[in-house]
Amino acid sequence: MKKFFNYVLIFSSLLFLACSSKIEKSPAAGYEPPTLLKQPRLYYPKIAQENALWGSTKLIISINENGIVNNVYVIKSSGHKILDSAAINYCKNLLFNPAKRNGKPVNSKIEWVIKFNISDQNWEIDNYLLELSRLYDKVQRLNQEYRIEVEREILKKHNEFVQNFSDALNFNKVLLQIILPEISKEWEKDWNGWPLSFLLYHDFIKRFPDYDSISVVKNLLINSLKSDIQYIKNTPALDINVKKEKEKILNKIKIFITTNYPDVILKDINLEANVSSIYLSKM
């Protein structure tokens, strides 16, 4: 088993608080406001972290009768364009149970506030690593009949980490202590570039190929791929070097998918099917 807990991590965690309130302060009788059904993962933009930018963005979200967001606009800026853009992109991917009037779905608008705060409190990352170390040791001592519950607990811990640890700068530093050596070696040149949350689920599949719900893990991997790819694409290319790095990592992800998960359709995760040959020799 990989010994990954070598020292105590002291990271700043990035706390996101998204609160919504209906614009209509005194709704008419029979009106039910929309409720959140699904939300994407939100990374604090790396450039904003590096420059210690923080603030709150207040937005208006237009939701159609299917619960899909069809328009987002800022009514109060955080004071930083990069944070406002991150908030807009995040809100565009929210999914709601639509508002109803007399039991029928209707269009609606809500206010939503995204708060970007850098805190000196970490996201219990030490506990996460300690728990994983304990669970990995435990699962090695059990036969297949009893391993499954421990494996489910490991997957649960991974999901909590991916959903809550939004620090794009330090995400991979945590990941590096968890995943198998052969996986980390394959991606060692990319640790300082972009958060690669999908590797956590790839690691799980490699460790526990007989897991009884492997299709569930693959879906989690695909969702993480979508989030990571969206983050990479939404990161501004301020110069030619950043643009090249974005192209390089996206091509490497394409190769990873076609090699390890050929049943995944690249278009479904917002990637073009072709791989630029200029990068093949560098992967």
Image (cartoon, rainbow, N blue to C red):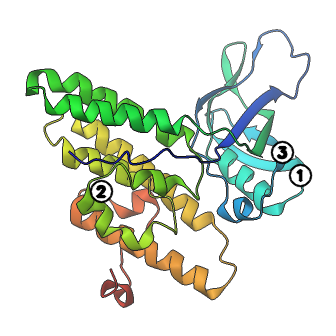
Pick the front one: 42 or 149 = 149
Q: Describe the element under mark 2 as helix, strand or loop.
A: loop
Residue tagged 1: 77
Q: Residue furthest top?
A: 29
Please name the residue shown 89% across and 52% down the image.
Answer: 77
Please name the residue shown 68% across and 53% down the image.
Answer: 89
Q: Eyeballing the image, is 126 above or below 100?
A: below
Q: Quadrant of residue 129?
A: top left
In the visual, does 254 lie left or right of 61?
left
Which label belongs to residue 61?
none
Expressed as whole percent of the image width and height from the top left, the position of residue 247 reads 49, 78
In the visual, does 198 lie left or right of 140?
right
Amino acid residing under circle 3: Ser
Residue tagged 3: 56
Amino acid residing under circle 2: Val
Q: CA distance from mark 1 to mark 3?
A: 7 Å
